[in-house]
Image (cartoon, rainbow, N blue to C red):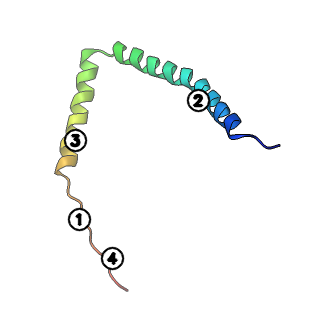
């Protein structure tokens, strides 16, 4: 039961084509949900993301070596 590389490619293409409608459906669902949001909800999400970005931009990472025993 050996399969040629050409058969493998066509089966991979079939798998990709089967998943494509699922991705498109998910994307359309996300767009519909985004359109349902009010301006206030969008503003609150944007401000929370901005606050997180500001906090992370000010953060410093310090490393202290572990004490030798």
Give the CA distance from mark 1 to mark 4.
13 Å
Give the CA distance from mark 3 to mark 2.
36 Å
Residue 19, x across and y down, in percent = 58, 26
Give the CA distance from mark 3 to mark 1.
19 Å
Name the residue beneath numbered marker 1: 62
Which of 38 and 18 lies nearest the eye of the viewer? 18
Secondary element at tag 4: loop
Name the residue beneath numbered marker 2: 16
Residue 33, picture quadrant: top left
Mark 3 / mark 1, whichever is N-terminal: 3
Residue 59, x across and y down, in percent = 20, 53
Residue 53's disc is 3
Q: Are marks 3 and 1 in contact (CB under 8 Å)?
A: no
Give the side of residue 39 with respect to residue 37, left or right.
left
Give the side of residue 13 with respect to residue 34, left or right.
right
Secondary element at tag 1: loop
Mark 2 / mark 1, whichever is N-terminal: 2
Circle 2 residues within 10 Å: few <14, some 14–19, many ≥20? few
């Amino acid at each position: 039961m050996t399969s040629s590389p050409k058969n493998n490619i066509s089966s991979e293409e079939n798998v990709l084509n089967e998943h494509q409608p699922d991705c498109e459906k998910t994307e359309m669902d996300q767009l519909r949900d985004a359109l349902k949001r009010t301006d206030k909800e969008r503003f609150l999400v944007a401000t929370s993301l901005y606050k997180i970005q500001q906090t992370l931009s000010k953060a410093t990472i310090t490393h202290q070596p572990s004490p030798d025993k």
